[in-house]
Image (cartoon, rainbow, N blue to C red):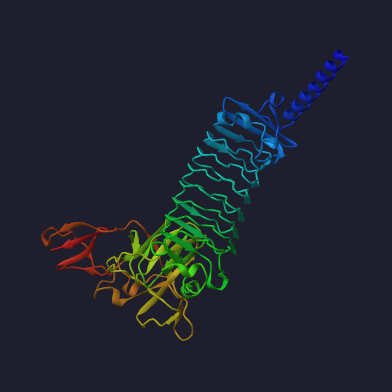
Amino acid sequence: MKKFYSFLLATVALLCSTAANAYATTGGWSSVNTAAYDGKCGDNAYWTLDEGALTIFGEGAMYNYAGNDANRAPWYADRENITSVTIEEGVTSIGNFAFDDCYNLTSIEIPSSVTSISDYAFYYCTSLTNIEIPSSVTSIGKSAFYNCISLTSIEIPSSVTSIGESAFEACYGLTSIEIPSSVTSIGNSAFYNCSGLTSIEIPEGVTSIRPNAFSGCYGLTSIVSHIAAENLFAPGDNAFNGIDNDACTLYVPAGAKSTYAATEQWKDFTNIVETYDLTVTAAGYATLYLGTAVEIPAGVEAYTAARIEGDLLKMQAVEDVIPANTAVIIKAEEGNYTFIPSNETPDAIEGNLLRGTLIDTYIKPASAQTAYVLSKVDGIVGMYRAKLKADGTFKNNANRVYMLLGEINVGEGDLDTSNPGGQLSNGYRFDFSGTTAIESVETESAAPAVYYDLSGRRVENPAKGIYIVNGKKVLVK
């Protein structure tokens, strides 16, 4: 009988090994020798642990485990030895308590086949410093990263629609969180006690912020909310408990300040400041004109127009802060950008050929003037002639920019290719090789041959002042 059982076990083992190897030869699990796996962690998912490297492979979902000895993950007993986790393509979920208490885990690779990170998946993984969540993931479960105290940053992909209760609770090392626009709900205590957070962004599509969501985030100095006034709701109790409402500024969409100031939880903030959101299309350009100085957000370049040379509009970069009432061209990748009011009061930029309006305005150019607006012609973005209505006007939308050129822009007799004058072009392409500051100081005796004032006019005999010479600002004394 013993020989029979031994034969039976050997046969079963051979069949399992043969099946696994057959799967490997047909394209599945090819990076791991499935005949040597340590055990199963899903109906069709397997695992192996080798010198601290845990590999999950196969197909479909991982099993869900529990935080008790009766149903722990099979590698739990070796958790202190696990330093890395690799999940291979084909696995579709990370199960409950999959890697909880793996306190020496420092890195993990998650494939694009994974769509969910379940409850307590990385609970108390205190050595995990960063994690890249693929864009296939749609949900982050309850306490998924609870007490991951070494996490300093995490990028939540735009595919995620829900963040579970206590998902990032006690992640003290996190300094900033930009929640993607796809998120509609933020769970109970989702970021509870993330005391290292200094700023957060809440997308416009959020319809629910549960109790204690940001409670204990006492390091916060700014909260940027994109929720429009008409969609605003009262967050759950103590959603912002423990935040210094005097030190933390709440930034809200333009025109929404009074609504936030009258809504529970939001109204507790002393400093509620309106921001401006700008959409940049696939063309990569937009225009902006605001009545307050604003910070230039990351990924955005801002320019004024210094002068004209032939059919080129020579652009001048604005650094860090756009002064109030300054018309600028915005250059950035396609997307939405938030401009936050600045505490600085930068000097006005002289010689800017661009103009703007704070409200929708119908503008009628003078008889000697030609109006230009941001357009794309023959695949090239620039400032092109505006189409006028029958009454000779064109509409400039609120916070947008235009340009007026004409004989007033050149000196008498200066009708050459370096200036517009009576030879106005149908459009001007942007030239970003201009200057951003005063580069050098010249005296009259050392003056270069060609001078332009800050309005783009050619000057034959420059007096004392600032001029443009060979693409640089110079000071004539």
Q: Residue 245 in the image: state x and y as whole percent.
A: 42, 64
Residue 31, visible in the rendered structure: no
In the image: residue 135, left or right of residue 459: right
Q: Residue 59 in the image: state x and y as whole percent.
A: 71, 38
Q: Residue 125 in the image: state x and y as whole percent.
A: 54, 39
Near-viewer residue (95 or 275): 95
Q: Please determine whether, in this image, residue 12 is positioned above or below residue 96.
A: above
Q: Residue at x 78, y 27 (%)?
A: 19
Q: Residue 416 in the image: state x and y as whole percent.
A: 29, 68
Near-viewer residue (200 or 146): 146
Q: Residue at x 49, y 52 (%)?
A: 193
* Image quarter in which the C terminus is found: bottom left
Residue placed furthest toward the top: 3
* Image quarter in which the N terminus is found: top right
Q: Residue at x 55, y 56 (%)?
A: 180
Q: Please determine whether, in this image, residue 185 is positioned above or below residue 8.
A: below
Near-viewer residue (377 or 355): 355
Image mark count: 0
